[in-house]
């Protein structure tokens, strides 16, 4: 699982809540870092904030969807979820939205649903961060 948010407190909040439920979590501070990490950690789900420096969440989602190696990954936006963000997110290929502030149980439910959708063989939705791959392949 890859959590992307420029706010360190929010990143830690999401990470801790998911780790308490047994998920393996890797974090990134913006879209550029996400795109750098995604091929190394092979996450099962990616959560994105919308407003971030360098590369925002909607641009990141668009790039993830345009890459054959990542287009299948479930992507959720965790943000204010304004009508603009939702409309733009749908156009970018975002699978789900969770409005801030959120209840930890809502976050866990959303991640489990996305994991189950991505892999029908998953048990209890707890597949973790994915497998790490070396840079050589």
Image (cartoon, grey):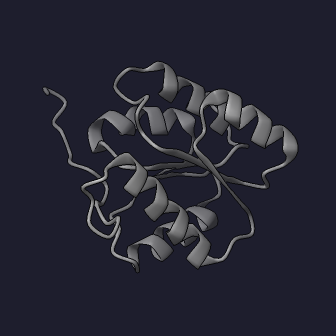
Q: Is residue 99 visible?
A: yes
Measuring from the top left, give residue 81's x and y in whole percent. Answer: 78, 51
Q: Is residue 6 above or below residue 59?
A: below
Q: Residue at x 49, y 19 (%)?
A: 66
Measuring from the top left, give residue 11's x and y in whole percent. Answer: 56, 62
Q: In the rendered view of the protein, which quadrant contains the N terminus?
A: bottom left
Give left or right: position of 61 versus 117. Answer: right
Q: Is residue 27 above or below residue 23?
A: above
Q: Residue at x 20, y 45 (%)?
A: 132
Q: Is residue 12 visible?
A: no
Measuring from the top left, give residue 129's x and y in whole percent. Answer: 31, 55
Q: Is residue 60 above or below residue 117?
A: above
Q: Residue pushed farthest right?
A: 83
Measuring from the top left, give residue 127's x and y in whole percent. Answer: 28, 60
Q: Residue at x 43, y 20 (%)?
A: 67
Q: In the rendered view of the protein, which quadrant contains the C terminus?
A: top left
Q: Residue pushed farthest front?
A: 120
Give left or right: position of 101 versus 83. Answer: left
């Amino acid at each position: 699982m890859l959590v992307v948010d420029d706010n360190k407190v929010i990143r830690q909040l999401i990470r801790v809540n998911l780790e308490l439920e047994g998920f393996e979590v890797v974090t990134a501070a913006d879209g550029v870092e996400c795109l750098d990490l995604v091929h190394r950690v092979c996450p099962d789900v990616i959560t994105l904030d919308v407003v971030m420096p360098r590369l925002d969440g909607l641009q990141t989602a668009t790039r993830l969807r345009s890459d054959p190696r990542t287009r299948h990954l479930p992507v959720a936006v965790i943000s204010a979820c304004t009508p603009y963000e939702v409309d733009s997110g749908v156009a970018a290929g975002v699978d789900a939205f969770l409005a801030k502030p959120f209840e930890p149980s809502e976050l866990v439910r959303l991640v489990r649903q996305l994991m189950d959708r991505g892999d029908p063989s998953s048990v209890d939705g707890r597949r973790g961060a994915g497998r790490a791959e070396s840079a050589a392949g």
